[in-house]
Image (cartoon, rainbow, N blue to C red):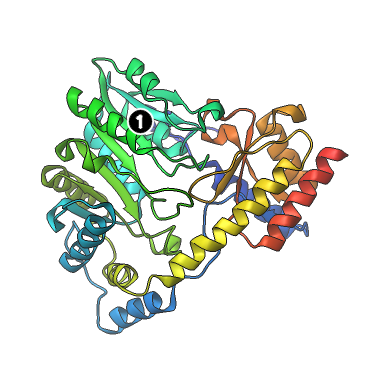
């Protein structure tokens, strides 16, 4: 395809999220009559809790269909600040919260506001692909910090320190982590927070999976770092099964919150008002459905990890959070992309190559276990049969 006229050069630096590309290919194969098992997209297969849906429906009936404040409704920011403070044992005010149309805008707005040509930003690799995409789109240099299986895919803080230079403006952390399911220990988070605070580097902490945790506790750098030099991302998509509602938020200093809200004004004016009412109900309503969902993910995790380790040439360590298994497929003799394509086109399994998450994902395959146990077992059987053939 030829590029359209008048396209800015920076558009050449803009990446994508491969999960949606593989999903589109899988859907096309399904339309041709091929049976497909989906383990590619990071979306809970549970419905949004009924009380949350009803809160939004009532808000619509009450006329909550108009513009709201750029930073979000005060009552929504109050509910988020209350929940954030209680769950993390910190003190956050509503003025430090910006409600966003999904969690991704927190990445986009923060990186655009922070980075310029010549700056450097360190991000986990393999990691959520939008980190690298947005760093490079800003004009800054994306500096990968490899996550290695021998370290349980946790960030090596000593290696992080070795990558810091006078040009480092931003460090991104993500725990629990996509795609590996790794979790940073409290000492890891404390050291990273102190390192960035001492050097005046902005720390961006992606905590979207903070409540999908199977072992230990979630640790936020907010406790140990400099909140004036930090932005935390969280949202409703994963834990409340609200991916289509497009509702997320950032927590930062008041000064940073003001800048993020101004970017939102320029981009999409404000988040949807009725979605925010639903978000308030999600936070303050019954939490049992979310707890049950996490327990179901725990069961599925065991099915997937055991099944992968039973396939010749495949190994998989146990993820501690999120809902992804990051399988080592090096002994199969295929590259990550080769196996992804083979499984998709020949075996009817839509999974993601590790390289969808960066160069250090080579030799791995990500499977989302946000699917039923029967479907997961079907995917594992097809993978086993394909590799045996």
Instruction: Read off the residue under disc 1.
Output: 135
Question: Residue at the location (17% across, 40% down)?
Answer: 227
Question: Residue at the location (46% across, 64% down)?
Answer: 241
Question: Residue at the location (56% across, 63% down)?
Answer: 296
Height in image: 85 above or below 223?
below
Q: Quadrant of residue 224?
A: top left
Height in image: 17 above or below 194?
below
Q: In which quarter of the image is the N terminus?
A: top right
Q: Where is residue 230 in the image (x, y as percent from the top left)?
A: 22, 38
Q: Is mark 1 on a helix, strand or loop?
A: helix
Q: Where is residue 360 in the image (x, y as percent from the top left)?
A: 54, 26
Question: Residue at the location (33% across, 74% down)?
Answer: 285
Q: Can residue 36 be seen in this view?
A: no
Q: Quadrant of the C terminus?
A: top right
Q: Position of residue 281 (x, y in %)?
A: 31, 73
Q: Is residue 85 visible?
A: yes
Q: Which of 4 and 349 is in front in this view?
A: 349
Total tally of numbered discs in the picture = 1
Q: In which quarter of the image is residue 317?
A: top right
Q: Nearer the viewer, residue 303 or 353?
A: 303
- Mark 1 Cα shell of 10 Å, populated few (<14), some (14-19), many (≥20): many
Q: Position of residue 179 (x, y in %)?
A: 52, 41
Height in image: 163 above or below 29?
above
Q: Nearer the viewer, residue 317 or 4?
A: 317
Say left or right for 142 vs 378: left
């Amino acid at each position: 395809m030829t590029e359209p006229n008048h396209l800015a050069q920076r558009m050449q630096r803009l990446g994508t999220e491969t999960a949606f590309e593989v999903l589109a290919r899988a859907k096309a194969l399904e339309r041709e009559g091929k049976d497909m098992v989906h383990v590619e997209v990071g979306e809970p297969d549970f419905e949004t809790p009924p009380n949350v849906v009803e809160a939004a429906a009532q808000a619509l009936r009450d006329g909550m269909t108009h513009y709201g404040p750029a930073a979000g409704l005060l009552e929504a920011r109050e509910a988020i600040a209350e929940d954030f403070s209680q769950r993390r044992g910190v003190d956050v005010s509503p003025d430090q919260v910006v409600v966003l149309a999904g969690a991704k805008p927190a990445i986009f707005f923060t990186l655009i506001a922070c980075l310029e040509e010549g700056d450097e930003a360190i991000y986990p690799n393999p990691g959520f692909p939008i980190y690298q995409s947005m760093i490079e789109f800003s004009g800054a240099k994306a500096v990968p910090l490899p996550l290695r299986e021998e370290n349980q895919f946790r960030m090596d803080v000593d290696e992080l320190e070795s990558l810091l230079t006078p040009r480092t403006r931003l460090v991104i952390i993500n725990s629990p982590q996509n795609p590996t399911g790794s979790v940073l220990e409290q000492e890891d988070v404390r050291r990273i927070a102190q390192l960035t605070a001492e050097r005046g580097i902005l720390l961006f902490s992606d905590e979207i999976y903070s409540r999908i945790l199977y072992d230990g506790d979630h640790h936020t750098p907010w406790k140990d770092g400099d909140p004036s030099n930090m932005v935390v991302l969280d949202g409703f998509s994963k834990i409340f099964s609200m991916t289509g509602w497009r509702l997320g938020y950032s927590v930062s200093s008041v000064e940073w919150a003001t800048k993020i809200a101004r970017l939102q004004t320029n981009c999409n004016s404000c988040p949807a008002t009725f979605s925010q009412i639903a978000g308030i109900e999600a936070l303050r309503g019954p939490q049992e459905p979310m707890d049950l969902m996490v327990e179901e993910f725990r069961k599925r995790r065991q099915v997937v990890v055991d099944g992968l380790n039973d396939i010749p040439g495949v190994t998989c360590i146990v993820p501690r959070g999120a809902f992804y298994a990051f399988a080592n497929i090096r002994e199969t003799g295929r590259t990550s992309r080769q196996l992804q394509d083979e499984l998709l086109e020949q075996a009817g399994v839509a999974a993601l190559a590790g390289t969808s998450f960066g160069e250090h994902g080579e030799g791995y395959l990500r499977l989302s276990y946000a699917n039923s146990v029967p479907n997961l077992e079907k995917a594992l059987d097809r993978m086993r049969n394909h590799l045996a053939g």
